[in-house]
Amino acid sequence: MTERPAKAGPDAGGTPVDVNELHRIVLQSLDDDQAVDVVTIPLTGKSNIADHMVIASGRSTRQVASMANKLADRIKQEFRKNVRIEGLPAADWVLIDADDVIVHLFRPEVRSFYNLERMWAFGDDSGLSATARG
């Protein structure tokens, strides 16, 4: 499950997106923007909603919003595809849906409250991979 047709622009004419490259771009963008505690959860075999879930924190709502906007712009530039973004006005928890990679950006307090890593690990920490520590 490494390539799927992508929805490029408003019409669904698809050029395939390399999921691993998309995942790499997401991680690089978050690293460039100094995201904190970046964690990747592989979803293959756990869910069919995506191949990867990336969870990261920003130090403030301003940083979270900025990381979300820059990531969306970078994906659009690199893959010519629009992503869906939820939660941007408040920027406590922003969800970026890039089809094969789902990104959750949190303020630290909100992240610890919802604890998505624990929920998606299903009691098995072996599937978690910390990809960057800030």
Image: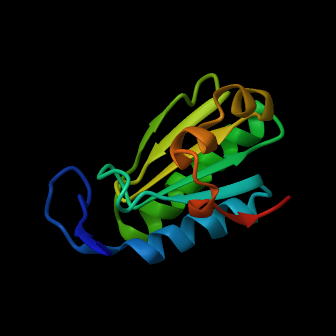
Left or right: residue 45 compared with residue 91? left
Residue positioned 79% across, 28% down in the render: 109
Whole-percent x and y of residue 65? 66, 38
Whole-percent x and y of residue 122? 52, 45
Q: Observer-nearest residue: 21 or 2?
A: 2
Query: How is this picture coloured?
Result: rainbow
Residue positioned 61% across, 54% down in the render: 70
Q: Quadrant of the N terminus?
A: bottom left
Q: Quadrant of the C terminus?
A: bottom right
Left or right: residue 83 compared with residue 91? left
Left or right: residue 101 compared with residue 103? left
Residue positioned 26% across, 55% down in the render: 9
Q: Picture quarter containing residue 105?
A: top right
Number of marks in the rendered image: 0
Residue positioned 50% across, 68% down in the render: 23
Q: Vertically, is 94 above or below 127? A: above
Whole-percent x and y of residue 39? 66, 57
From this viewpoint, which residue is outermost toward the top?
A: 90
Q: Picture quarter containing residue 133?
A: bottom right
Whole-percent x and y of residue 97? 42, 47
Q: Vertically, is 36 above or below 88? A: below
